Amino acid sequence: MKKIVVGITVVGKDREGIVAAFTNFVFSKGGNIEKVNQNVIKGLFGMYLEVSFSKAIDVKKFDSGIQDLAKKEKMDVNTHHETNSQKNIAVLVTKEPLCLQTILANAKSLKGKISVVIGTEKTLEPLAKKAKIPFVLVEDKIQDKAEDKIIQICKKYNIDLISLARYMRILSPNFVWRYPNRIINIHPSLLPAFPGASAYAQAFERGTKIVGVTSHYVTENLDQGPIIFQDSFKVDPNDTLEKMKTKGQKLEADTLVKAMKMHLENKLEVRWRKVHIKSVN
């Protein structure tokens, strides 16, 4: 029998005994812990457990048991079961259209369903409506409030993968820790150079001869997550900043879709903060 793998995220107020409570629960159900990562930032605790079962388990019973434990420990817990069934995708956007347009144009080749588009403003709503995909506006300026709403939307649509298609907000650890290695961002530079905003302007000012884009998994450290793919283009000395941006935006969109495809086909694996591409048997 193929082993069953379950990802468990635990987020809440830090205190002693949390790690033991959840690892003991897994052991009591006959599970084996494959990975454990934990973090504490400003009193917020986050843990990711990847557990496997070599014997058949009642998934619903396991999930309800861990939710009972979550209530007792006052933690927010989510389980993610790796299956080959179609995965649900949420695309987060602001106003730049090209990444969303490219994702929608490639929707049929993705091993997943674009279940919802979430926007910080209404600019790209017509694109989603035309594709018959629900569009949800979350325009709260306070990021904590916005993230609370996005978390609820992602739960409602049972989201497996979040794609940041030029979503111009910084996600907090409280959000990121709930989706470990399941949020893909596209950044307009060859990271680790030129992190943060205005990457093209930084590259233009420095007179770089090659400009690139980076798709990466999102972690609590801005633009520092495991790199999935990078691509680049040559810059003509006579190129304006606008021309550089136009070239870059097309490459951004293509690189983001490439990373999404590989993730959805279970071809990517993160080990020691590096992304490895699994060889196809």
Image (spheres, helix red, strand yellow):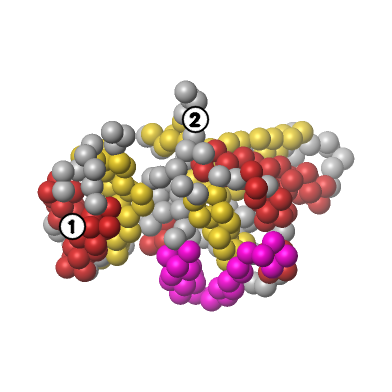
Residue holding disc 2: 277
Residue 217 seen in render? yes
Residue 147 seen in render? no
**Residue 82: image location, x then y, percent:** 38, 45
Mark 1 surroundings: few (<14), some (14-19) or many (≥20) residues within 10 A: some
Residue found 70% across the figure and 38% down from its top: 211
Instruction: Indicate which disc residue 150 carries.
Output: none
Q: Is residue 208 left or right of residue 183?
A: right
Q: Is residue 177 left or right of residue 47?
A: right
Q: Is residue 123 magenta?
A: no
**What span is colored magenta in the figure?**
129-157
Residue found 50% across the figure and 25% down from its top: 280
**Residue 88: image location, x then y, percent:** 50, 55
Q: Are marks 1 and 2 in contact (CB under 8 Å)?
A: no
**Residue 85: image location, x then y, percent:** 46, 47
144 or 208, nearer to the observer: 144
Residue holding disc 1: 18
**Residue 254: image location, x then y, percent:** 68, 43
Asked which quadrant contains residue 128, the reply is bottom right
